[in-house]
């Protein structure tokens, strides 16, 4: 989701934790955050676990099957449920 979309749809965060990829470490991200008073907090190089919450959440909701949901991921379960509702 683009930063501009996030900033219009949510309360402005004080900081954003990001990895060191070129898409985040560039001048555009720096200018955007500076202009809005949002700090960019980079994880330490070689420490992807510091950004694990997002990766875990994505995997947990879209790929990992859950026994309570008939061994399908939550996202798939909700799609099927919404189709029958």
Image: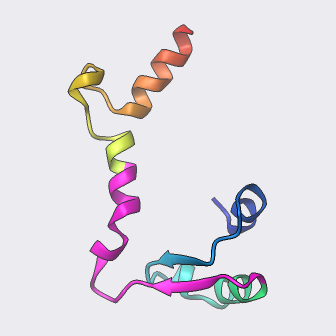
Which image quadrant for residue 67? top left
Between 77 and 37, the one lying in front of the other is 37
Between 59 and 13, the one lying in front of the other is 13
Answer with left or right where residue 14 lies relative to residue 71. Answer: right
Q: Give the image location of residue 46, x and y in percent.
A: 27, 85
Q: Give the image location of residue 47, x and y in percent.
A: 28, 82
In this rendering, the answer to whether 59 lies above or below 22 is above
Residue at far top of view:
84
In this rendering, the answer to whether 78 lies above or below 48 is above
Q: Give the image location of residue 18, x and y in percent.
A: 48, 77
Residue at far left of view:
67
Query: Measuring 46% from the left and 81% from the top, which residue is drawn there?
Result: 21
In this rendering, the answer to whether 47 lies above or below 49 is below
Q: How many marks?
A: 0
Which span is picked out in magenta? 36-58
In this rendering, the answer to whether 73 lies above or below 81 is below
**Image quadrant where one finds the N terminus:** bottom right
Query: Measuring 55% from the left and 14% from the top, which residue is drawn there?
Result: 83
Q: Is 57 one of the magenta-colored residues?
A: yes
Answer with left or right where residue 43 lies relative to residue 83. Answer: left
**Image quadrant where one finds the C terminus:** top right
Answer with left or right where residue 60 lies relative to residue 85. Answer: left
Between 38 and 29, the one lying in front of the other is 38
Query: Measuring 37% from the left and 71% from the top, which residue is drawn there?
Result: 51
Q: Give the image location of residue 84, x and y in percent.
A: 53, 8
Query: Measuring 33% from the left and 89% from the top, which residue is drawn there?
Result: 45
Which image quadrant for residue 23? bottom right
Which image quadrant for residue 32? bottom right
For the rendered model, the colour scheme is: rainbow
């Amino acid at each position: 989701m683009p930063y501009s979309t996030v900033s219009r749809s949510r309360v402005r965060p004080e900081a954003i934790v990001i990895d060191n990829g070129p898409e985040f470490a560039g001048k555009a991200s720096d200018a955007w955050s500076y202009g809005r008073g949002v700090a960019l907090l980079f994880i330490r190089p070689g420490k992807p676990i510091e950004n694990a919450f997002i990766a875990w959440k994505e995997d947990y909701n879209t790929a990992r099957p859950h026994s309570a949901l008939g061994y399908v991921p939550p996202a798939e379960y909700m799609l099927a449920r919404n189709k029958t509702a």
